[in-house]
Amino acid sequence: MNSVVTAGKFITFEGIDGAGKSTHIEAVQAFLLARGKAVVMTREPGGTELGEAVRGLFLGRSMSPHTEALLVFAARREHLEKVVWPALERGDWVLCDRFTDATFAYQGGGRELGFERIASLAHWAHPDFTPDLTLLFDLSPDAAHDRVARRGELDRIESEAAEFHRRVRDAYLQRAEDEPERIKVLSSEQSKDTVRSRVLVCAQQLLAREA
């Protein structure tokens, strides 16, 4: 249970690069706006001036796995204090492209730092605060790479070897297995319309719990 008292809801969108998560965030935004909800859309790393600066470093500069993890949690704490928590306290719904599950997956799994170390950082940065709903868009690393490659130049993370992305995917699926009530796995092998329908069902279920 979240220790931060909030009136709004926090939905995060996760998945390996190329899984298609970003294409569905706007659909959820439109769904919620049509039902009278105030919506804040944001992303990690990013969401604040400091966070966007960290994003540039994170995606463009070579660094150790430990530095990656520490940087992203520094940006995350700023993001929570400046954007996410104030919005939730106002009663807004916050839609975030990646959150701490991404750090478990990319640094804990992909960089092989392990879940325990990431969990310790998460407890320090945002103790007892978790999303109300996480939508995990799942796709094989090979298919995801093909999608990303069609977009053009790859960033530092997208350019990692296939084995790295397999570890990331495995870590994401482990997180979903550990927290099935919060994390809903959506297969991006299906058509966009099918995935979008499932996404909106999940949003509707969360909306119904608010009533």
Image (tube, rainbow, N blue to C red):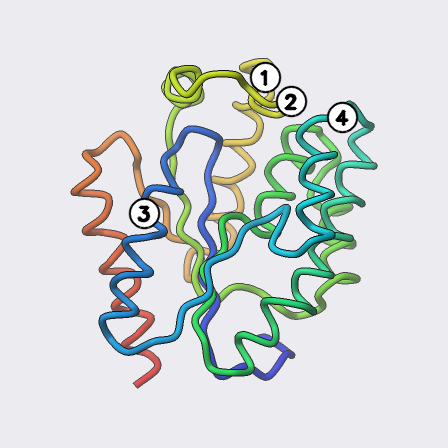
- According to the picture, the residue beneath numbered tag 3 turns out to be 24
How busy is the neighbourhood of tag 3: few (under 14 within 10 Å), some, or many (20 plus)? some
- Give me the C-alpha separation between circle 1 and circle 3: 24 Å
Disc 1 from disc 4: Cα separation: 13 Å
Q: Give amino acid for label 3.
A: His
Query: Is residue 10 found left or right of 55 in the rendered image?
Result: left
Q: Nearer the viewer, mark 1 or mark 4?
A: 4
Q: Are marks 2 and 4 in contact (CB under 8 Å)?
A: yes
Q: Looking at this view, is 153 or 149 the one in front?
A: 153
* Residue 69 rendering spot, x and y as whole percentages: 76, 41
Amino acid beneath label 1? Ser
Image spot of residue 52 (x, y percent):
66, 46
Q: Position of residue 102 (x, y in %)?
A: 58, 43
- The reply to whether the C-beta atoms of the residues labelled 1 and 3 are less than 8 Å apart is no
Instruction: Say which element carries label 3.
Output: helix
What residue lies at 27% left-to-right and 61% top-to-bottom?
Answer: 30
- Label number found at residue 156: 2
Determine whether label 1 and label 4 are within 8 Å by CB.
no
Mark found first going from the N terminus, 1 or 3: 3
Q: Which residue is mark 1?
A: 159
Q: In the picture shown, does residue 146 fall above or below 167?
A: above
Q: Nearer the viewer, residue 194 or 52?
A: 52
User: Relative to 146, does residue 115 appear above or below in the rendering?
Assistant: below
In the shown orientation, is residue 131 left or right of residue 80?
Answer: left
- Lower sequence index among marks 2 and 3: 3
Circle 2: residue type: Arg
Residue at the image point whose x is 52% and y is 32% from the top = 170
